[in-house]
Amino acid sequence: MEHVTPSLESEFDRATGSTLIDDGTYAGEIEDGWDINGNANGGYLLALAVRAMRGASGRPDPISVSAHFLAPGKPGPVTIETSMVKAGRQLATMTGSMRSGEREILRVLGAFGDVGAMSGGFSSVVGSPPDLPPVDECVVRDQQSGIVNIGLMRHVRVHIRPEHAGFADGVKSGRALIEGWFEFGDGRPIDTLALMLVIDAFPPPVFNIDIPVGWVPTVELTAHVRGIPAPGPLRCRFHTEFVQNGFLQEDSEVWDSSGMLVAQSRQLALLPKG
Amino acid sequence: MEHVTPSLESEFDRATGSTLIDDGTYAGEIEDGWDINGNANGGYLLALAVRAMRGASGRPDPISVSAHFLAPGKPGPVTIETSMVKAGRQLATMTGSMRSGEREILRVLGAFGDVGAMSGGFSSVVGSPPDLPPVDECVVRDQQSGIVNIGLMRHVRVHIRPEHAGFADGVKSGRALIEGWFEFGDGRPIDTLALMLVIDAFPPPVFNIDIPVGWVPTVELTAHVRGIPAPGPLRCRFHTEFVQNGFLQEDSEVWDSSGMLVAQSRQLALLPKG
């Protein structure tokens, strides 16, 4: 079981904490202010569920986590029911189910382990972190975008590469790509749990193409943790290649200050009929 | 519930069929001969589980399926326990658990729907199918590769682009990329269920780099079905970008004869200590 040290508690730790109330079941709360127009951000919901699952797994890190988003998350109490599928030597496989009353919001299947203990060994990497301008030359993602209120931006700072940021003013780049920096507003260090938030904290990159909708609800999101982040802001790349037949894919790659890939994610989102 | 028409039964349909024996529970069999050195191919196991889940979902197609591989699949009877998480209008979210006796082999979380009903609408695609040489100028993936017996190749035909096929004779291309054609040996049409097999039927693309291991067991695989395949063989691209810290990612894109993307997949595999 996991205990948060209150004296070091950050906004993120407070908002994702939960308490074991029964065998494998945790009580937590969707905190107000991690939302987009009143609905909790998907990465925040994922972090809340994964934190409980991580506690129940007895392992320090999420390694591969797949989540299906079933209903919008509104502020208020939730339960997170966790269940061990297999406790292996390297990995513990778990399920998690987050409910608000009787309504299931999120179902998660994931493997937990010790990323630090796996570090090193054979390495072969194609690609590199985005070569971003300094943080202060990037465009901060606003808390207000037209009629959309992005409460999440009260807690995190997303600094977007200027060429990718014009969509907010109606100037689309024409390519479904958004790169930028991520850091917490209160300076909290970014651990493997916080990566669950990072991978869903940027605007959808399809806002940079002529997509006929203003929102793209996530059906499923899978995140892979590939390393323990070194201190400092993260360099992130979000991109979409395939919008067709009512769905789109969105991928991310997240790199730390040492130039190591620390997370990858892919989500399948619905393209509402415009 | 799903019924296979016996008179049209192909090898794949026979090997992935199962019978409802109890509320949500199906009895099936891991058929001998869909293996690699005695262990059932991951895509075959996935197809067997997803076929039962699809039957229980009442929807025609898998849309997004995530599977955790927990133990090797050996020939013999299995049960597949399915459970409805949410029956929505567009999607039905299901879990599936495949067991051989008491041992769980596979845990699946997936969303099912009607890909045909979603077809059309706004489309934006970056990238294109691999420009492959004709099937008869490609290299057939052998049933025997050194000491490895790939039983799966008795049922499917994988035709690899010659520049990507030399690894079998020790000539690695130096890039973790394998492109080629896929078709069934008995000519069975490729539907959305068969895509579960396609996305794991090629050799690991890391065999084309100097990786110090001969096998890379899958931890987790997520497949997205993005269209209903037109008749004819499929063009497939398998590639790995990130091998580090004891894991590697492997992605696939699968295109039909009309040039439409019909599936994407990503898996996280373990890099055994060499």
Image (cartoon, coloured by chain):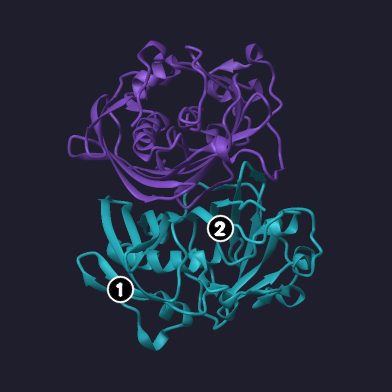
Chain colours: A cyan, B purple
Percent coordinates x, y for residue A204 in the rendering: 64, 60
Are the residues under marks 2 and 1 on the same chain? yes
Q: Chain of mark 2?
A: A
Q: Label 2 vs label 1: CA separation?
A: 26 Å
- Answer with left or right where residue A177 lies relative to residue B10: right
Foreground residue among A71 and A151: A71
Is any atom of residue B148 visible in this view?
Answer: no
Percent coordinates x, y for residue B124 in the rendering: 71, 45
Residue count near mark 2 (Cα–Cα under 10 Å), binned few <14, some 14–19, many ≥20 = some
Label tally: 2
Please tell me which of labels 2 and 1 falls first in the chain: 1
Secondary structure, mark 2, is loop
Residue count near mark 1 (Cα–Cα under 10 Å), binned few <14, some 14–19, many ≥20 = some
Percent coordinates x, y for residue A229 in the rendering: 52, 66
- Answer with left or right where residue B228 lies relative to residue B95: right
Residue at the disc numbered 1: A27
Q: Quadrant of residue B75?
A: top left
Q: Amino acid at mark 1?
A: Ala
Residue at the disc numbered 2: A217
Q: Is residue B255 above or below residue A201?
A: above
Camera-near label (2 vs 1) is 2
Q: Residue at x 28, y 64 (%)?
A: A56
Q: Residue furthest right?
A: A171
